[in-house]
Amino acid sequence: MARLEGKVALITGGGSGIGREASLLFAREGASVAVVDRDEAAAAETVALVAAAAGSKQAPAVAVTADVARAADCEAMVAAAEQAFDRLDVLFNNAGVMLGADDDAQTTDEATWDTTMDVNAKGVFLGCKYGIPALRRAGGGAVVNTASFVAKVGAATPQVAYTASKGAVLALTRELAVIHAREGIRVNALCPGPLRTELLMKVLDTEAKRSRRLVHIPMGRFGEAAEIAKAALFLASDDASFMTGAEMVVDGGLTAAYVTPE
Ligand code: NAD
C-alpha cells in the first residue's frame, strides 16, 4: 500500500529542489499535495510534473502562491490546502533561502540577516502557527521542518545568518514536538547535507568552491534532492510513528567525519 494513501500534504518551497521532488514522491505515495512557492510559475510547473507522472490511482496536486515570511500568506496557504482537499495531514515546512551576502558577523549586513531569518526561521514558525491547528482539525498529523547540517557543525566558510536560522529550526522543532506529543502531532526536522540543487549551486558557483566543499563529504559527492525527499517521506508517514522531536541527518557522512577518504 502507498505510504501516504488518502493523506493531504502541504509542501513549501515546492517549486524547486527538495520541495519539487517531495511533491512528486508524496503524490506517488498517494497524497494530495498543495505545492506552495512564492514563485507562482515554479509551483505550477511542479503541479504539471505531478500530473504528467500521474498513474491512474494518483491523487491530485494544486499550486498555491505564498511567501512563507508573511503571516497572511501562511494563513491563506493552509486554507487553500483545506479548501482543495478538505483536510491537512502533513505539513512540510521546507522553503528556505541562502543569500550570497551572508558571511561572518562583521561583514554580514543587517538586511541579509533579517531576510534569512524571516524566511528560514519565521517561515517555519508561521507554517506551524497556521498548519498545526489544521492538523489538529484532521485528528493529528506530521510536521517535517527542513533544517540543515550547518545547524550541527561550524564552518570556516561562514554563512552566519543561514546557520543561525537553521539552529532556530531545530530548537523550534524540539519544543513543538513536546507541546503537541499527546495530540497525535509529530514534529521532526531534516538535516540535509550539501545538495546539488539551485540553492547551493548558486553559491558554490565555481569548480574551486565546489571542490572545497566536497573535501568534507566522506561519500565524495553532493546529495540529490530526491534522496532528501525519501527521508521526508519517512518522517511524514506512519513508518515514523514513534519519532518526534528528532533530527534526521542525511548528509553523506559529513557530520560524522573528522578526516575524509583521499
Ligand atoms: P531550492 O532553491 O532548489 O528551492 C527552494 C524553493 O523555495 C524555491 O522554489 C523558492 O522559490 C522557494 N522559496 C524561497 N523563499 C520562499 C518564500 N519566502 N516563500 C515561499 N517559497 C520560497 O532549494 P533546496 O535546496 O531544495 O532547499 C530546500 C530547503 O533545504 C531549504 O530550507 C534549504 O535551506 C534546505 N537545505 C538545502 C541544502 C542544499 O545544499 N541545497 C542543504 C541543507 C538544507
Image: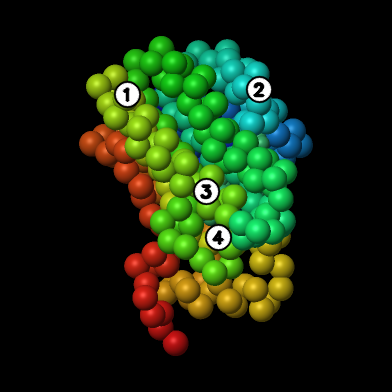
- For discs 2 and 4, the disc positioned in front in the rendered view: 2
**Residue farthest to the right, as pictured:** 41
Q: CA distance from mark 2 to mark 3?
A: 24 Å
Q: Secondary structure at mark 3?
A: helix
Residue 216, given in percent of the width and then of the height, sits at 47, 74
Position of residue 114 relative to residue 104, above or below, is: above
Sequence order check: which comes first, mark 3 or mark 1? 3
Residue at the spot of label 2: 73
Q: Nearer the viewer, residue 256 or 109?
A: 109
| Residue at mark 1 to residue at mark 4: CA–CA distance | 31 Å
Q: Earlier in the sequence, mark 1 or mark 4?
A: 1
**In percent of the image, x 62 and y 31: which residue is there?**
68
The first of marks 2 and 1 along the sequence is 2
Name the amino acid, label 3: Ala
Indicate left or right for 78 with 67 as reference. left
Is the shortest distance between ligand 1 and the CB of mark 4 under 8 Å?
Answer: yes
- Whether residue 59 appears in this view of the structure is no
Quadrant (top left, top right, bottom left, bottom right) of the N terminus: top left
* Residue 180 - label: 1
Residue at 56%, 33% (x, y): give it: 122
The residue wearing badge 3 is: 164
Q: Using the image as rendered, state which of residue 60 and residue 147 is in the foreground.
A: 147
Q: Tell whether label 3 touches label 4 (CB within 8 Å).
A: no
- Residue 195, label in figure: 4
Tell me where residue 171 sits by quadrant.
top left
Q: Secondary structure at mark 4?
A: loop
For marks 2 and 4, give the CA distance: 28 Å
What is the spatial separation of the Cα atoms under label 2 and label 1, in whole angstroms?
24 Å
Amino acid bearing label 2: Asp
Foreground mark, 1 or 4, reads 1
Upstream in sequence: badge 4 or badge 3: 3
Which three-letter amino acid code belongs to the residue tagged 1? His
